Image (tube, rainbow, N blue to C red):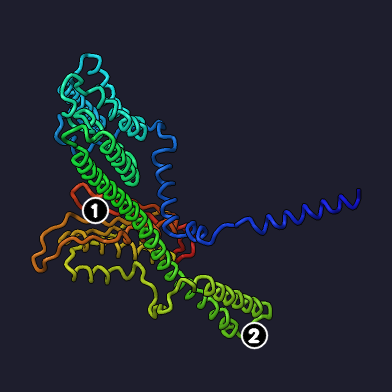
Amino acid sequence: MLYVTETTHSQTNHTQTNHMQTTPGPKRGDDALFSSPEFRVAMDALAGLRADLFHDPFAYRPLPPRSRPGRIAQVLPGRLRPYAVWAPHALVGAAAMLALLVTIEGSWGGLIETLAIAVFSLGPILLTLVRPVGAFWFSLVSIPVVAVLSHDWGGDYMSGDYPWKPASFVAHLVVLTVVAARTRPRTAAWMWALTAVYAMGAEGLFGYHYFSSNAVPFLFLAALSLLVVTVLHVRRAAEEEVTAQQTVTARERSQRTLLEERTTIARELHDVVAHHMMVVAIQAEAAPYRVEDPPEELAKAFATIRENAVAALTELRRVLGVVRAEDYAAPDAPQPTLADLDALLANVREAGLGVEKVVTGAVRGLPQGVELSAYRIVQEALSNTLRHAPGASARVEIGYVLGGLGLRIVNGPAGEVSFVKQTPTEGAGQGLTGMRERVSMLNGEMTAAPAADGGYEVTVFLPVASVTVEDGEGA
C-alpha cells in the first residue's frame, strides 16, 4: 500500500507539471493591447461615459435661481426686476409650452393619445429643472413612444417624419440644450453621440418604411446648439478663472506692498536705532577721559554701558540687517524730521501744489521714530495729492497736544493747471498702506476718507508716552 500511494502522488505531480507546461499563459500581444495608449484612452472615455450618464442618473439636482439679476432685468419694469433671477426657469417653461403647442398641432389621434404625447414631450423638458441627466434618458426613451403614438394608422404608412416626430424634435433638442448647460461639455458630447447612435439604429431598422428622414437635420441642429452651449461654458469658466486670478493677484499685490513698506520702515528704524546706539557706545567710551582721575566704579560702569551698546548694535544689525537689499546703502545724512518739513513743502510748491502749513501747540522735540513717521506721512499725503488731484491746494496741520502729535493733511478737489497739462494717475495703493503701517507701528490712529468738498483728508494721531522738555520735567 505504501508503494502504491507513493506512485499515485508521483503520477499526480507529474500530471500537474504537464498541465502547467501545456496551459498557455497570457500572450504578449494582449499585454501590448492593454497597455497601449489607444486602449487607455478608450477605457478613460468609457469611464467618463459611466460617470456622466450612468452613475446615479436620476440624482436630485434642482436648478437654483441666479445669484443676481442679469441683463434682462434692465428691460423689465421695476416690479418685475426682483424676479429676473428666475429667468432660466421661465425659459425652460416657455420651451415646454412650445413643445405642447407642437404636440397639439401635430396630433392625429384622440384625446388620450394627445395627452400621452404631451406627457412624453413636456415631461423631459420639465424634468431638466430637477434631474437633468434623468431628463435626457427620459427624452431618449420617449422618442420611439411618441413616434408610435403620433402615427396615423389609418393613413399612408410611408408618410410622416422619422425618426423624430415634431413633438419629439422640439422636446429632445430643448432637453439636450438645457442638460448641456447644466452639466459639462463632456456630457454634451456623450449625449449627442448616444442620440446619433439611436438615429442610426432607427434608420437602419425602420427607415426604409418612410420617404423622408429628419435624422441628419436634427443631429446638425443639436450639434450646433451643443457647440454654442459648450463655447459659453468655456467662456464662463475662463471668466471665473480670470476673476479668481485677479483676486489672488490683488491679494498678493497687497501683501507685497505691505511687506515692501514694512521693509522700508525696518530699514529706516535700523538706521535710526543704529545711529543712536553708536553714539551711546562712543560717548560711553569717551566719558572716563573727560573726568580727571575717575573712580574705578565709574570707569567700569561706562565700560559696561559701552559693551552693552556694542552688543545691542551687533544684534540689531544681525536681526534687522536681513531686510536690506544687496544694493542698499545706508544714507549718509540723518533721517528727516519735522524740522525738515519746510524744505519738503518748498519742493512741493515748485511742483505746482499750493500748500499751507499750520502748527498749533508748543513745539517740542519728539522721539526720532515719531518725527520720521510724521514726516513720511506728510510726504506721502502730499505726493498722493500731486498724483490724484493735480491743480488742487493742500493744507498741513500739525498739532502738538498732550500725549502725542496730531496731523491733518487735507486737499481740495482737482483743479485746472495752466502751466502744465496733468491728469490724475492711478497708483498701486502703496501710499495709504505705508501710512497705516507707520501709524500701526506706533500704536496710533488714522482715518483717510474723501472730504465734503470733493477733496481728500488724512487725519493721524501718534501717541508719545513721555515727552522731555528742556527744564527736565515730564510733560
Image quadrant of residue 252?
bottom left
Distance Cα–Cα, label 1 vs label 2: 63 Å
**Which x, y percent locates residue 460?**
35, 55
| Residue 157, horizontal then vertical, whole percent | 19, 26
- What amino acid is found at the position of numbered circle 1 in the picture? Tyr
- Between tags 1 and 2, which lies in front? 1
Judged from this view, the residue extending furthest toward the left is 418
What's the residue type where badge 2 is placed?
Asp
Q: Position of residue 412 (x, y in %)?
A: 19, 55
- Residue appearing at x 60%, y 57% in the figure: 24
Relative side of 427 to 253, left or right: left
- Residue 177: x and y in percent read 26, 38
Q: Which residue is mark 2?
A: 293
The residue drawn where x is 56% and y is 76% is 314
Q: Which of the pair 220/241 is nearer the observer?
A: 220
Work out whether residue 461 or residue 430 is closer to the camera in this orientation and state it: 430
Asked if 66 appears above or below 330 in the picture, the reply is: above
Judging from the image, what secondary structure is the residue with disc 1 in? strand
Which residue occupies the foreground of this view, 204 or 238?
204
Residue 456's disc is 1
Q: Quadrant of residue 79?
A: top left
